[in-house]
Image (cartoon, grey):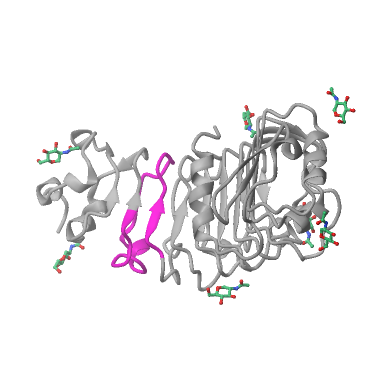
Amino acid sequence: MAKGLLSHLLFLSVIVLCNGNYAGCPEYYLLKPCTCKYRPEFNVLLCSTVTNSTDLIRVLHSTGNWTFFTLFVHRSNINYIPTTSLINKRFKNILIASSYVDFLFDENLDSENDVEIIHLNDVNFIHPFKWEWFRPLKKLTYFNLQYFSVPTISTQISSNFSSGLRYFLLSNTNTSRLEDGVFVNLKNLTEVKIRYSLIEELSRMMFPVPAKLEKIDFTGNFIKSLPDDLFSEMPELKIVLFGRNRISHISRSIFDFVSYQLDIFNLMGNPLICDCNLRWLQNESRNIIHGICANPEQLIGVYLTNLTRENFDYCEP
Ligand SMILES: *[C@@H]1O[C@H](CO)[C@@H](O)[C@H](O)[C@H]1NC(C)=O
Ligand SMILES: *[C@@H]1O[C@H](CO)[C@@H](O)[C@H](O)[C@H]1NC(C)=O
Ligand SMILES: *[C@@H]1O[C@H](CO)[C@@H](O)[C@H](O)[C@H]1NC(C)=O
Ligand SMILES: *[C@@H]1O[C@H](CO)[C@@H](O)[C@H](O)[C@H]1NC(C)=O
Ligand SMILES: *[C@@H]1O[C@H](CO)[C@@H](O)[C@H](O)[C@H]1NC(C)=O
Ligand SMILES: *[C@@H]1O[C@H](CO)[C@@H](O)[C@H](O)[C@H]1NC(C)=O
Ligand SMILES: *[C@@H]1O[C@H](CO)[C@@H](O)[C@H](O)[C@H]1NC(C)=O
């Protein structure tokens, strides 16, 4: 599940500016059982297969004033990340994967921390998960949560995030409902991803107006149709991913707002009906819509990009 996470975080590190003392790694006896991966300016405190939950706190204490760009906890048990360490260690990236954690932070932080990236992949929290943990992270731009149940995403939940948040990414969270207005106050969002969940409906009211969104990814949900105005006032939108949903019809009107700026609109794995209602597709000069016809019978298996004018000859003019 957490494969590729390390290379991903190194990539992320490169795009984040830094200042402060990140030069070098402390000696191993201070870090044990964690290790430090030295990258000029971007060193990583890596705690993998740490079984004693008190070890992380001990390491944070024994490394004193050493700072780290990234904290990466993997296949470990930890109590929590002391909020004092967020300030001392100047962590910018916090990544936890396949681990048991009592709770994320021990007390309410003030906003003096530098945390920009939170990535939680398959983390089992022993105590209740609190969205308030993210409230003091005023510099947070990237939030990624995977394999953790979040049935509803409400405006209350999203109000805990910094208004500078740019990436809101969930996967396998069993999310079935997004409240109207849920992302409205996150005006700088450039990517919303909620993959492999249970969402059935989307509405334009969920997103900011105008929205700076460049990418929308709802791959692997139960969406049956998309409202015509979904992409209105999204002048930066380039990538739209709705693969593996239940969409059967796409109307021309949904593209009125975005057809010339989109690079890709993915509908693979949807039961698309390629009947006369889809005839407008013939007039689209760019092949940006990807999907496969599931109906009518004579077109089953044909790619949208391969439909020809003849396929619609039988339709009323
Ligand atoms: C965990 O670490 C603490 C403090 O270093 C120590 O007292 C305790 O014995 C350790 N527990 C285990 C199970 O190793
Ligand atoms: C750590 O930093 C604090 C505050 O800057 C300073 O007072 C303290 O002496 C430093 N400790 C060490 C071991 O350098
Ligand atoms: C933060 O999220 C919680 C839900 O976990 C919610 O109850 C609370 O109202 C939110 N806090 C604020 C200040 O919006
Ligand atoms: C999501 O729901 C399925 C089916 O109920 C369950 O097996 C799975 O563990 C749930 N996932 C999470 C992250 O809670
Ligand atoms: C949103 O983005 C703009 C442009 O990048 C930036 O100037 C502004 O400070 C950001 N807003 C917040 C709340 O971070
Ligand atoms: C396609 O474009 C032609 C010429 O602009 C127009 O007459 C026709 O109605 C369009 N067909 C559809 C299905 O939109
Ligand atoms: C699309 O059409 C081309 C040319 O007729 C054909 O070679 C190709 O196999 C078709 N692709 C699919 C996926 O149907």
- Indicate the quadrant of ligand 7 in the picture: top left
Residue 313 position, x and y percent, is: 11, 50
Q: In which quadrant of the rendered view does residue 102 lie?
A: top right
**Residue in view at x 71 percent, y 57 percent:** 90
Pick the front one: 100 or 88:
88
| Front-most of residues 113 and 299 | 113
Judge whether residue 192 can be spotted in this image.
no
**125 relative to 195 in the view: left or right:** right
Chief secondary structure of the magenta portion: loop
Q: Which residues are magenta?
A: 237-264
Task: Determine the residue positioned at 69% across, 61% down.
Answer: 114
| Displayed quadrant of residue 184 | bottom right
> On the rendered image, what quadrant is the N terminus found in?
top right
Give 286 or 255, whichever is nearer the viewer. Answer: 286
Residue 76: horizontal and vertical position, in percent?
70, 31
Q: Image quadrant of residue 36?
A: top right
Going 21% across and 59% down the picture, which residue do you hit?
286
